[in-house]
Amino acid sequence: MRITKTDFLEYSFCRKNLWLKKHKPELFDGLELSDFEIKIIREGNIADEAARKLFSQGTLIESTNELAVGETQRLLKEGKEVLFQAAFEHEDFFIRSDVMVFDAERNGWELYEVKASTKVKNSPSELQNHVTDLAFQKEVIESCGLVVTKIGVILLNNKYVRHGQLDYDELFTTVDISDDVAEVTDAVRAKMQEMKEYLQMPEEKGCDCLLRGRSKHCVTFAYSNPQVPEYGIYDLSNIGSSKRKIETWVDEQRFGLDEVREDELSKRQRLQVETYLNQVSHVDKKAIAELLNGLEFPLCFFDYEGLVAGIPLYDGFTAYEHVPFQYSLHILHEDGSVDHTEHIITEVGSDMMSPLVEQLVTDASAGGTFVSWHASYERGRNEKLIELYPQHAAVLRSINEKMFDLEEIFTKNLYAHYGFKGKTSIKYILPVLVPELSYKTLSIQKGDHASERWEHMMKLTTSVEEKEQIKQDLLEYCKMDTWAMVMIYKHLVQECVEPTQAHTALEYA
């Protein structure tokens, strides 16, 4: 049974999930990667390819499996000193190494892994662990008769700001982790042997993910743990950071929300459990009314969409810095009338964001309170635009200063409903409060999909017809975000604000 470094990392995270992948692959049929997961893989491949420019006269091994192993051995015999994607196999273990450079002084090889990350990851709780990844590679390479003299991780430099053509020497930074790898080598070697034995054993019950929050569960968690309800302790707000609580409940086999005690929960978690078990809502009408009555008309419901990329695509940006490429603005006036304005960047250029900023500055002249959802994102994008366009700093800072985060009504537990399931994303709130409005009718339904579509639209190879369709889909998606906020706001006014205090807009809700 072939064991790759990906298998090893997965085993270190959840060994049962790997066992199922090897012995019951049918359980994974139909499981598709999300747009976000696909983007992560693509970012890694792009970084790997770009990092090769740091090394002169390297040889890329493009064949696969046994052919790649044979080609690697041939190139080693020919005396090639820089290899990309070298392949090695020893017993059941198989690896591909991003970069290997011959160290003539010490008669060995420097081993480098390229990561589309800005820092070394070395946490046992993470699936991606750079140190154990390279320790596994080193063990296989040295078992094949080579000597590894140095081990490093090639990372993206988040201090590098792109201006014009990419400067690859500045784009990347290399961290020597030879000592870190040495510290875990014995443990990795032992785990490799343990792994071989485990994969030959009968299927075990449960899986390691029982002690983690829902976001870190393996894809076969439900299969391995049928005693865990679809909605239970793992869905409690912020439970992933409460390891001791989870350990206690797992030890006592308490997985349902009706099995936890009130004194074990935070205030937010108690509200979540109470509203769910009783199928009710909890609404602090007075506090919500005070917040809403403090807003200044016209209310400007505002939302950005942004692209994040490991290797910066546009001037003025660093690795993983969000590029705002569109916004939507619904303006609710005191008489109840609503205006809408929007902007989307459709052409690549050295100053492509200038029209977006200039239109936003014009639109902001309406005054009033800007209303966003998870407003730290909009504020952050405005701060970046201030950096790029300081001539508009006064208006952009004014927007930030006047911004109200509508999500806070839900994050501060002023409004809790069993249908929210402890979440505060607008995608959870909208179906409960405004069920007649839905993202499901749109071609684009999530932010990561919007980013992927915009990036595709901006490619020179995308046809004019496809560009136009993507543009319309993006405009509809962003428009839905701000319109959803308008409708949630109106629902809150109707439910929480006394008629004598209500804004005039209530008459139009």
Image (cartoon, grey):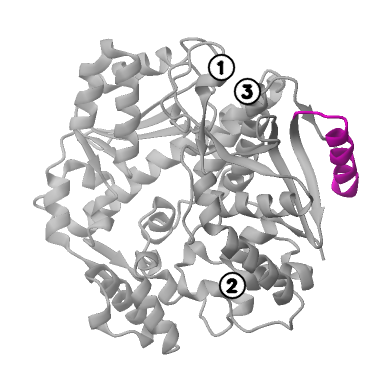
Dot 1 or dot 3: first in sequence order is: 3
The magenta region covers: 64-81
Q: Are marks 1 and 3 in contact (CB under 8 Å)?
A: no
- Give the amino acid at mark 2: Phe
Label 2's element?
Answer: helix
The answer to which of marks 1 and 2 sits earlier in the sequence is 1
Which residue in the structure is indicated by mark 3? Answer: 54
Helix, strand or loop at label 1? It is loop
Label annotation for residue 166? 1
- Residue type indicated by callout 1: Leu
Whether 77 is among the magenta residues is: yes
- Residue 455 shown left or right of residue 489 in the figure: right
Q: 159 or 139, which lies in front?
A: 139
Picture coordinates of residue 281, whole percent (x, y):
29, 70
Q: Secondary structure at mark 3?
A: helix
Query: In the rendering, which numbered label is found on residue 221?
Result: 2
